[in-house]
């Protein structure tokens, strides 16, 4: 398994192309060779390919804004072929039954077709969980995450399982990696500290030894460090400390 950096961690440092390019270099200087692009300013596919190549980086996953993901799917797929990224992700869905356009039914009406188009285009659609997927699905004893895995075939959709949000939802990250084995090629490593705080990997309370063990068994290829909230610290420094922890555990 290879470690990487999720650029949502450093999104505030990537709101112009110049700053984005500088941040790519800083992340590469830490030692990361794999990244996810998410939360940055808009970019052209050719520009991103050039910057990745210049810094010796590989993008293995993106999160694409919904209007583009749903309305410009063919172009999104083409862009991912340009910069060599195999996974196209949806970063958030509210599962709010009070709003039809945010409901479970709306998800099922919309995203399986998007996933199929992505599959037919030679890429793989990835869904990123938060904690709302641990609510019961409407009219069901199952939680939403279970229903998604049951109703959408594995060949069409994988899960970017997020360790912090699984724990925040009352789940066990290692157990869920085992349950979703075969469809978690990319996961997010995010530590959980007292007070529901996001923490540098190894500085919170998640048992990452079990996470690593189950991720390997589940077929995970990439483990990406993500820290949405660095609690006032420099996000680059947080990525550096997470990298030091993970390399000390034997990962590269």
Image (cartoon, grey):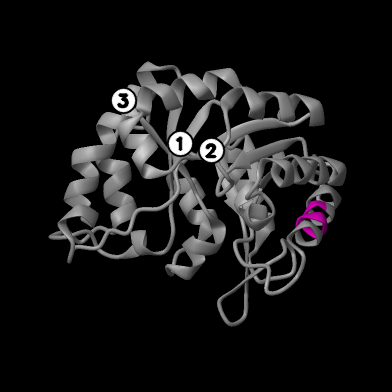
Report which residue position mark 3 lands on.
116
Residue extent of the magenta highlight = 239-243
> 204 or 180: which is nearer to us?
204
Task: Looking at the image, tell me whether mark 3 or mark 2 is earlier in sequence order.
Answer: 2
Question: How far apart in space, not on screen, are marks 1 and 3 (Cα)?
Answer: 15 Å
Q: Is residue 160 above or below residue 72?
A: below
> 237 or 112: which is nearer to us?
237
Report which residue position mark 1 lands on.
183
Q: Label 2's element? A: strand
Q: Is residue 156 above or below residue 102?
A: above
Horizontal relation, residue 94 to residue 86: left or right: left
- Can residue 154 be seen in the rendering of this structure? yes
Residue at position x 43%, y 69% from top?
170
Q: Is residue 100 above or below residue 64?
A: below
Q: Is residue 5 above or below residue 193?
A: above
Horizontal relation, residue 21 to residue 96: left or right: right
Residue at position x 72%, y 64% from top?
200
| Mark linked to residue 163 | none
């Amino acid at each position: 398994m290879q470690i990487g950096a999720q650029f949502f961690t450093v999104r505030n440092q990537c709101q112009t192309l110049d700053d984005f390019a500088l941040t790519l270099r800083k992340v590469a200087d830490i030692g990361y060779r794999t990244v996810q692009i998410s939360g940055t300013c808009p970019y052209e596919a050719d520009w991103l390919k050039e910057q990745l190549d210049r810094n010796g980086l590989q993008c293995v996953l993106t999160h694409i804004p919904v209007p583009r993901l749903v309305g410009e799917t063919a172009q999104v797929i083409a862009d991912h072929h340009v910069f060599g990224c195999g996974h196209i992700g949806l970063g958030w869905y509210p599962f709010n039954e009070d709003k039809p356009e945010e409901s479970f039914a709306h998800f099922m009406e919309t995203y399986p077709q998007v996933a199929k188009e992505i599959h037919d285009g030679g890429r793989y659609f990835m869904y990123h969980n938060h904690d709302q997927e641990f609510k019961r699905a409407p009219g069901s004893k199952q939680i939403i995450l279970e229903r998604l895995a049951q109703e959408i075939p594995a060949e069409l959709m994988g899960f970017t399982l997020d360790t912090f949000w699984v724990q925040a939802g009352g789940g066990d990250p290692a157990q869920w990696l085992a349950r979703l084995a075969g469809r978690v090629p990319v996961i997010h490593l995010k530590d959980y500290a007292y007070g529901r705080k996001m923490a540098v990997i190894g500085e919170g309370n998640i048992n990452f030894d079990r996470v690593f063990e189950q991720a390997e068994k589940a077929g995970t290829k990439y483990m990406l460090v993500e820290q949405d909230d660095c609690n006032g610290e420099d996000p680059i420094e947080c990525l550096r400390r997470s990298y030091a922890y993970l390399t000390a555990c034997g990962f590269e």
